[in-house]
C-alpha cells in the first residue's frame, strides 16, 4: 500500500472526502504524520 493510499484512508476518516489530486507525495506524508494517532484512537 502506498503512502497516498494510506493518506487517502486517513483523510476519508477525518474529513469525509478523498484527498485532492493536486496534493503531492510530501503532503500525503504530512497527512499520515498528523492524523495517524487521531485515526487509531477513534
Image: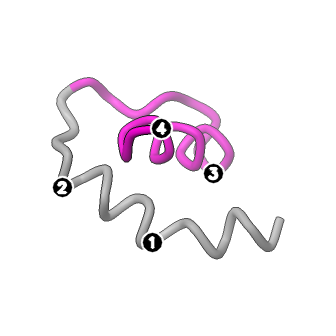
Q: Earlier in the sequence, mark 1 or mark 2?
A: 2
The magenta segment is: 1-21
Task: Quote the CA–CA distance across marks 3 and 2.
Answer: 19 Å
Residue at 58 percent across and 49 percent down: it is: 10
The nearer-to-camera label among 4 and 1 is: 4
Task: Quote the CA–CA distance across marks 3 and 1.
Answer: 11 Å
Q: Earlier in the sequence, mark 3 or mark 2?
A: 3
Q: Using the image, tell me which numbered label, if any, was put on residue 9.
A: none
Residue at 80 percent across and 73 percent down: it is: 41
User: Quadrant of residue 38 in the image?
Assistant: bottom right
Task: Quote the CA–CA distance across marks 4 and 2.
Answer: 16 Å
**Count of numbered tags:** 4
Q: Using the image, tell me which numbered label, if any, was put on residue 14.
A: 3
Q: For mark 2, what is the residue?
A: 26
The single residue placed furthest to the front in the displayed view is 1
Task: Quote the CA–CA distance across marks 4 and 1.
Answer: 19 Å
Q: Position of residue 8 (x, y in %)?
A: 49, 37
Other-residue count near label 3 (Cα within 10 Å), few / some / many at <14 / 14–19 / ≥20 = few
Q: Position of residue 11 (x, y in %)?
A: 53, 45
Image: 32 above or below 10: below
Residue 3 magenta = yes
Q: Earlier in the sequence, mark 4 or mark 3?
A: 4
Q: For mark 4, what is the residue?
A: 1
Q: Do the CB atoms of the residues marked 4 and 3 lie less than 8 Å apart? A: no
Residue 18 magenta = yes
Q: Earlier in the sequence, mark 4 or mark 2?
A: 4
Q: Is residue 6 left or right of residue 19?
A: right
Q: For mark 1, what is the residue?
A: 34
SS at mark 1 in the image: helix
Amino acid at each position: 500500500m502506498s503512502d497516498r493510499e494510506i493518506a487517502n484512508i486517513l483523510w476519508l476518516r477525518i474529513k469525509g472526502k478523498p484527498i485532492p489530486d493536486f496534493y503531492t507525495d510530501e503532503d500525503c506524508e504530512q497527512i499520515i504524520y498528523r492524523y495517524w494517532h487521531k485515526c487509531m484512537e477513534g
